[in-house]
Image: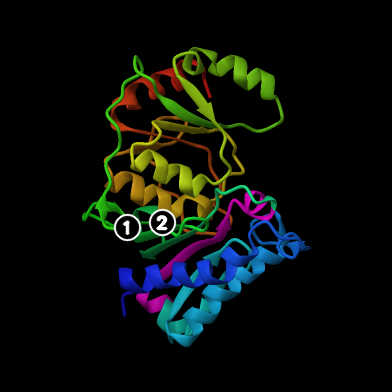
Amino acid sequence: MELDIKFLKQLAINVYEVVNPLLGTKEAAKRLKRGAGGDISMEIDIIAENAIVDTLEKANVNLLLISEEIGEKYIGNVEKAKLNQNVLIVDPLDGSNNAVRGVPYCSVSIAYAIGNQINDIKKAVILNLNTKDLYWAEKGKFAYLNNTKLEVSDLDISQKCFFELNLPMKALMKNLHKLNPIIRNFYRIRILGSSALTLCQIASGSMEAFINLRHSNRLVDVAAGMLILKEAGGKIFSLEGTEIDHDLSINAKFPFIACNATLESFLKEGIKLNKY
């Protein structure tokens, strides 16, 4: 049975209810084991993920869960899950370091697919764990912030564009130098700490672009945001300027460029000229 958007929203709210009281606390920051995504899991990460697993198990669903901490886990009947190809791609807490330090920019990201490719994602929910604002989309049915339809901005590179930059620390200065022809045209740079929420900021017109050159960027961080951005009229593409359509897997990692439609050609040309 296909999951509906109402269920996905409630799943995100359940995470909010257990995580929000812990934001900025010492309990939240307790370091545990390394998660399947590669980072050291903290207490707040595990609490967020457990809220999702518990809700799914109580709902008697049959699906493959791909999640930041647990990796890949079948919920319910394995054979039925494989047959119906239901997949839930989740980052229970995107922006964990912000969350434990009390920086108000973190989220839960939930994408729902029927199939095994990024293009098979049908529904998406991202909830701001500080404000409880809910971004959501269904494929072909636009994107929304709570009940308000989202649309990317129409600012071009000659106007006051905001963008986020996420670079690997290795060869940082070299990358900054190569990006200089692009960077010098932007009005402000932001480095906020939750990729899921930043994609929503572009979708809502609050920012214009996100350049993420980290090859360690995980699918779980951006799966929901990709659909929300596209449904709001935005663009997201590889460093080669091509569509991103990886397998749905905990091991899927890739850099990307996201932007409003107006900046697409400028960014593709800039990245191409600098041979990323």
Mark 1, residue position: 146
* Quadrant in which residue 88 is drawn: bottom left
Residue 12 shows up from this direction: yes
Q: Earlier in the sequence, mark 1 or mark 2?
A: 2
**How many badges with numbers are in the image?**
2
Residue at 65% from the left image edge and 64% from the top image edge: 22
Q: Foreground: 17 or 252?
A: 17
Going by the picture, which residue comes out furthest to the left? 141
Residue 15 is situated, as x and y percent measured from the top left of the image, at: 52, 69
- Residue range in magenta is 82-100
Vertical relation: 102 (above or below) 156: below
* Secondary element at tag 1: loop
Q: Mark 1: few, some, or many residues within 10 Å (few <14, many ≥20)?
A: few
Residue 133: which disc? 2
User: Residue at coordinates 24% horizontally, 52% vertically from top-left?
Assistant: 142
Could you tell me the amino acid type at mark 1? Asn
Q: Is residue 88 found inside the magenta-colored segment of the image? A: yes
**Residue pictured at 44% horizontal, 76% vertical:** 63
- Quarter of the image containing the N terminus? bottom left
Q: What residue type is disc 2 on?
A: Asp
Contact (Cβ within 8 Å) of mark 1 with mark 2? yes
Name the secondary structure under disc 2. loop
Residue under the point 43% across and 81% down: 62
Q: Is residue 30 left or right of residue 55?
A: right
Q: Examine the rendered structure and indicate whether residue 272 appears above or below residue 7.
A: above
Residue 59 found in image quarter: bottom left
**Whole-percent x, y for residue 73 in the image:** 56, 74
Q: Position of residue 26 (x, y in %)?
A: 76, 61
Residue 115 in view of the camera: no
